[in-house]
Image (cartoon, rainbow, N blue to C red):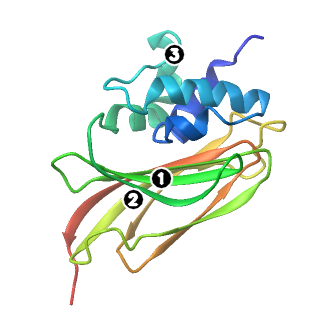
Amino acid sequence: MMINRKIIIAVAVLLAVIHTAFAQKNTISRGKVRAEFTTNSLGEMFYLVAADLPENYKEHADAFQFIKDVPVDWDDTKILAAEPGDYVTIARKEKGKSNWYIGAITDETERNAVIPLSFLDKDWEYKARIYSDAPGAGFNTNPEAYIIKERLLNSRGTLHIRLAAGGGCAVSIVPVKPAHR
């Protein structure tokens, strides 16, 4: 099976922070490609792997930025939601910093990830960069489509992100200023 390089880009962005154990349980054929890429991208390994030739990533530099940003060492890992074999949402805190990375993946069922942000420091406001499935995306329909959004958030908020069938999301969260009291 020939893998479209755009799928590899979207997979890298959407699933880079998903825990290896869940990724290996995914049973969708395209999901299996994502699961394998995720296993090679991050997990308990201490390096990241980007499949394909570097020049093939140039047209998706916006999406590839997540791979550049995501660390390889963590201070904390939180499982925010999970149903084995169906979906998982995990947050990981970069070692020695206040940056967080969230990853979510779903099986062949489209769903909305509801991500409470109570794990964030209540004294700070954060900027989130959200890499997610585009409207109309799915493993059978338009698997290459993704969108990137930025927004401000804090520990009192909740992210609501649509996960396309066989899809997922990745979120990088960095502190920007002390919260107003």
For mark 2, does the 10 Å Cα neighbourhood hold few (<14), some (14 to 19), or many (20 or more) residues? many
Spatial CA span between label 2 and label 3: 26 Å
Which labelled disc corresponds to residue 51?
3
Which labelled disc corresponds to residue 128?
2
- Write down the residue under mark 1: 90
- In the picture shown, does residue 18 fall above or below 110? above
In the displayed structure image, the side of residue 27 where residue 140 appears, left or right: right
Q: From this viewpoint, which residue is outermost toward the right?
A: 140
Closer to us: 4 or 155: 155
Could you tell me the amino acid type at mark 2? Ala
Tell me what residue is drawn at x 23 percent, y 64 percent: 176
For mark 3, does the 10 Å Cα neighbourhood hold few (<14), some (14 to 19), or many (20 or more) residues? some
- In the picture shown, does residue 170 fall above or below 116? above
Tell me what residue is drawn at x 84 percent, y 36 percent: 140
Tell me what residue is drawn at x 48 percent, y 36 percent: 16
Residue 67 screen position, x and y as percent: 40, 32
Name the mark nearer the viewer: 2 or 1: 1
Residue 126 screen position, x and y as percent: 30, 65
Q: Earlier in the sequence, mark 1 or mark 3?
A: 3
Report the quarter where the N terminus lies.
Answer: top right
For mark 1, does the 10 Å Cα neighbourhood hold few (<14), some (14 to 19), or many (20 or more) residues? many
Q: Earlier in the sequence, mark 2 or mark 1?
A: 1
Could you tell me the amino acid type at mark 1? Ile
Residue 71 screen position, x and y as percent: 30, 37
Evaluate if marks 2 and 3 touch, with contact meaning CB atoms under 8 Å apart.
Answer: no
Closer to us: 42 or 52: 42
